[in-house]
Image (spheres, helix red, strand yellow):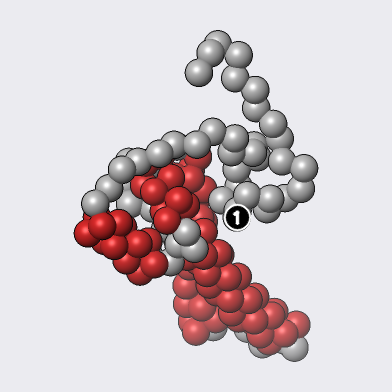
Amino acid sequence: MGDTIETVLKKRHGQAGPDGQAYLRSFRLELRVSYAELSAIRDRAKSAGFTSVAQFVREQALHSTASDSPTQRHKAVLACGYELNRIGNNINQIVRALNAGRQLDDEMLLVMMQVQDIASEHFIRVTAQRDGARE
């Protein structure tokens, strides 16, 4: 490799996988392994939810901690969306009760505090995953 390494942006999103990489992967890295090692790597990649061995090896090499597959990250985002919808439903029920003239009681206050706790937990988890993906 010389001093002039050309980086080429992808022409369309998802061109080389769902990992958020903006540049085409134009360099090849070869690695020799035994048959037993290859089988073990394939099994670990599959059990971790990766769609390819290359994607698994790349993630493991680039991140010092064990990383989730893009599929697992997507499922986590969907789970957060589901939780946010549940939170929204709880808030709507409380607002309807308050608009109907009902006083804020201990149960509604408890739900609102739980909503705040859940929202804080999800915010911390999502920002930690996002920051971990950037390292």
Q: Residue 76 placed where, x, y %?
A: 50, 66
User: Does residue 132 appear left or right of residue 78 in this picture?
Assistant: left
**Looking at the image, residue 47 lies above or below residue 55:** below
Taking the spot 75% from the left edge, 88% from the top edge, the residue there is 100
Taking the spot 50% from the left edge, 18% from the top edge, the residue there is 1
Taking the spot 47% from the left edge, 59% from the top edge, the residue there is 52
Instruction: Tell which residue pokes out farthest to the top in this image.
Output: 3
User: Does residue 37 appear left or right of residue 83 in this picture?
Assistant: left
Three-letter code for the amino acid on which mark 1 is drawn: Pro
Between 34 and 100, the one nearer to me in the picture: 34
Q: Residues within 10 Å of mark 1 (few under 14, many from 20)?
A: few
Mark 1 falls on what kind of element? loop
User: Does residue 14 appear left or right of residue 72 in this picture?
Assistant: right
Instruction: Let me know if residue 98 appears in the view.
Output: no
Image label count: 1
**Looking at the image, residue 118 lies above or below residue 93:** above
Instruction: Let me know if residue 93 appears in the view.
Output: yes
**Looking at the image, residue 129 lies above or below residue 6:** below
Between 83 and 99, the one nearer to me in the picture: 83
Q: Image quarter for residue 98?
A: bottom right
Q: Quadrant of the C terminus?
A: top left
Q: Residue 64 placed where, x, y %?
A: 32, 41
Between 108 and 87, the one nearer to me in the picture: 87
Q: Residue 116 placed where, x, y %?
A: 51, 65
Question: What residue is pinned by disc 1?
Answer: 18
Q: Residue 50 placed where, x, y %?
A: 45, 62
Taking the spot 51% from the left edge, 78% from the top edge, the residue there is 111
